Image (tube, grey):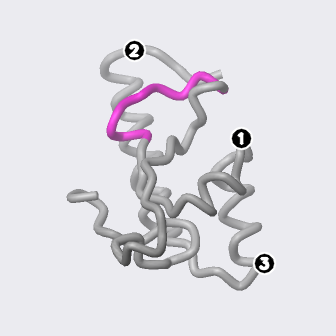
Amino acid sequence: MERDGRICVWCGRDVDTGLVRATTEHLIPRIKGGPSWTENEVVACGRCNRNRGHVSPAEWLDQCELLGMSPNRPLVVARLESLQRRIERDGGQWR
């Protein structure tokens, strides 16, 4: 949360209110081969993390916008680009 702030990357809600559960979400889900690296993690509220399931980041961004939420698309893109650079540097891949 220090790196990305206390705002859910998907819906824009403040996750530091005591009413909203903050989670760390994997952009590329671990079940789909996503690593547990900070480059693959973003702040998400519990509701968005749970509702997203294993949907791809691109699909979920679109769904969030269709639902009237305000996802932080630039941050998601930046994290995915950072993850890609790390994979190229250190090896590994997602499925």
Residue nearest the viewer, comparing 19 with 55: 19
Image side of residue 33 versus residue 91, left or right: right
Find numbered disc 3 in the image and state the secondary structure of the residue it sits on: helix
Instruction: Name the quadrant containing residue 63.
Output: bottom right
Name the residue type under label 1. Answer: His
User: Which residue in the protein does label 1 denote?
Assistant: 54
Instruction: Name the quadrant containing residue 47.
Output: bottom right
Q: Disc 2 or 3, which lies upstream in sequence?
A: 3
In the rendered image of this protein, does residue 53 appear above or below residue 2? above
Query: In which quadrant will I find the N terminus?
Result: bottom left
Measured as percent of width and height from the top left, residue 48 is found at 62, 61
Name the residue type under label 3. Answer: Leu
Which marked residue is nearer to the observer: mark 2 or mark 3? 3
Between the residue at mark 2 and the residue at mark 3, the CA separation in whole angstroms equals 35 Å
Q: Is residue 53 magenta?
A: no
Q: Disc 1 or 3, which lies upstream in sequence?
A: 1
Neighbour class for label 3 at 10 Å: few (<14), some, many (≥20)? few
Between the residue at mark 2 and the residue at mark 1, the CA separation in whole angstroms equals 23 Å
Image side of residue 58 versus residue 81, left or right: right
Neighbour class for label 2 at 10 Å: few (<14), some, many (≥20)? few
Identify the residue at the far front of this view: 18
Q: Which label was assigned to residue 91?
A: 2
Name the residue type under label 2. Answer: Gly
User: Which residue in the protein does label 3 denote?
Assistant: 66
Region rendered in magenta: 32-40
Q: Residue at x 33, y 69 (%)?
A: 6
